């Protein structure tokens, strides 16, 4: 997992921080938060994401608590993602 932010390198600034955008590119999921914090993690290691077609992996919905892939029946919480748990086998 990779995180970045010019003002806070420890994660979203508070529990009220919200995701603005989630995307998929070259085997990685990228999430940008309102605070400017960005998180990325690989699809490899998550059986549903790594075996899915690109179109389905890129169809990411943002909920208040995490990410959802409707066509893959996969959900990952922001808390889990920030702890490095993103659906490993």
Image: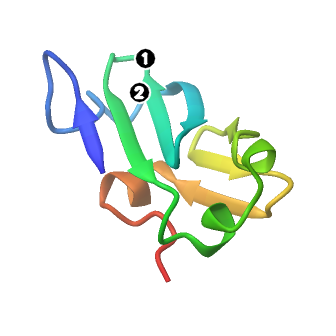
**Residue 26, image x and y in percent?**
52, 42
Counting residues from the start of the chain, the first of labels 2 and 1 encountered is 2
* Residue situated furthest right in the rendering: 71
Q: CA distance from mark 2 to mark 1?
A: 6 Å
- Say above or below: 35 vs 66: above
- Disc nearest the viewer among 2 and 1: 1
Question: Position of 38 compared to 30: left or right?
Answer: left
Which numbered circle lies on residue 34? 1
| Mark 1 secondary-structure assignment | loop
Q: Quadrant of residue 34?
A: top left
- Say above or below: 86 vs 61: below
For the point 49% across and 27% down, the residue is: 18
Which numbered circle lies on residue 17? 2
| Mark 2 secondary-structure assignment | loop
* Residue situated furthest bottom in the rendering: 89
Which numbered circle lies on residue 1? none
**Residue 1, image x and y in percent?**
30, 51
* Residue situated furthest front in the rendering: 26
Q: Quadrant of residue 37?
A: top left
Q: How many marks?
A: 2
Q: Quadrant of residue 49?
A: bottom right
Asked whether disc 2 touches disc 1, contact meaning CB atoms under 8 Å apart, the reply is yes
Question: Position of 5 compared to 73: left or right?
Answer: left
User: Crowding at label 2, few (<14), some or many (≥20) Cα neighbours within 10 Å?
Assistant: some
**Residue 30, image x and y in percent?**
47, 35
For the point 79% across and 43% down, the residue is: 55
**Residue 33, image x and y in percent?**
43, 24
User: Crowding at label 1, few (<14), some or many (≥20) Cα neighbours within 10 Å?
Assistant: some
For the point 61% across and 74% down, the residue is: 47
Q: How is the image coloured?
A: rainbow
């Amino acid at each position: 997992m990779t995180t970045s932010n010019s003002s806070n390198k420890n994660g979203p600034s508070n529990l009220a921080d919200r995701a603005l955008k989630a995307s998929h590119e070259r085997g990685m999921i990228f999430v940008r938060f309102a605070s400017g914090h960005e998180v990325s993690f690989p699809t490899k290691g998550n059986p549903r994401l790594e075996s899915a077609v690109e179109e389905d992996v890129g169809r990411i919905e943002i909920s208040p608590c995490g990410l959802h892939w409707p066509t893959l029946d996969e959900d990952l919480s922001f808390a889990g993602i920030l702890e490095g748990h993103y659906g490993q086998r």
